[in-house]
Amino acid sequence: MQLKYSYFPGCKITGQFPEYGAATTFVMKALNVSLVDMPFNCCGYPIRHQSMEASVFSAARNIAIAERAHLDIMTPCKCCFGNLKHSLHLLKNDPILLKQINERLKEEGLTCSGTIEIKHLLTVLSQDIGLKNIEKRITHPLPPTKKVAASYGCHALRPADITNFDNPFDPTIFENLIKITGAQTVFWSKRTECCGHPISEKNPSLSQALLKSKISDAIQAEANLICTACTYCQMQYDELGKDELNGIPVISFSQLLGEAMGRTL
């Protein structure tokens, strides 16, 4: 039976990281997974501090659209994943908020009931498809000299009781997926810490310091590649990390896995 999901790329992939999106769709197609494009809007993450209600409404509309198609949502962005999961949690536990949101959704003939799941790309790969099935599709194993630092992204890990992504203190899902490509993984103490992007506008100096600390830790762990699974983390490394990376490339896991599966640019 073919796996099928409503595909939520998020705003940043479409506009800033088309290669991230192209690699994701390539990998899913190679693994016989169907991704269905839908008329989604922003996940609501960028406005959560200005208006939580507007953020939840934005997420709820996306959830309602996916529910109408009876499909779970799959996203390669951990900020989108985190905000959609958090909003779904709020809607399920606050009947008054759910009623208010659905009153607005009625104008489009939509209803949000919370019957679908929100899944990140890594979860779909690891749990729904399975490591063994992916390993069978590895046609161009990466050399073990490629030492990869998995940059988790905090929005998928915390709060753990809402995201249910992995152990927030000692996650393994990312490293396990990287290993099947043939590459090595390195352990670095700051792999689960924030990249600094959420405060890049309010406190740019602190944001830069957080990223600099992460990069320094990855370098000390002898990584020669940093791998992300979040568009905001990728954006932070690309925009603020250039002077600190010392030539170390930063790519998405979709691109890394795609390379091991024979994808060429």
Image (cartoon, grey):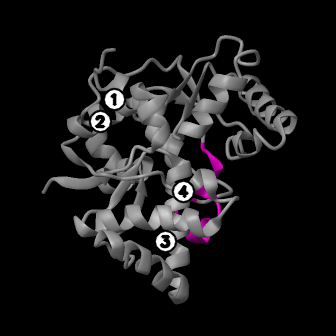
**Disc assigned to residue 25:** 2
In the orientation shown, which residue stands out farthest toward the left?
1
Magenta residue span: 152-166
Question: In what quadrant of the picture does the N terminus appear?
Answer: bottom left
> Count of labels shown?
4
Q: Earlier in the sequence, mark 1 or mark 4?
A: 1
Question: Residues under labels 3 and 4: Cα distance?
Answer: 12 Å
The answer to whether residue 154 is magenta is yes
Name the secondary structure under disc 2.
helix
State the residue at coordinates (40%, 65%): 61
Question: Residues under labels 3 and 1: Cα distance?
Answer: 28 Å
Question: Residues under labels 1 and 4: Cα distance?
Answer: 23 Å
Q: Earlier in the sequence, mark 3 or mark 4?
A: 4
Question: Residues under labels 3 and 2: Cα distance?
Answer: 25 Å
Q: Are marks 3 and 2 in contact (CB under 8 Å)?
A: no
Looking at numbered disc 3 in the image, what kind of residue is underneath it? Answer: Leu
Q: Which residue is mark 3?
A: 88
Q: Which residue is mark 1?
A: 22
Looking at numbered disc 4 in the image, what kind of residue is underneath it? Answer: Gly
Is 191 or 110 nearer to us in this picture?
A: 110
Say which of marks 4 and 2 sits in front.
4
Q: Which residue is mark 4?
A: 44
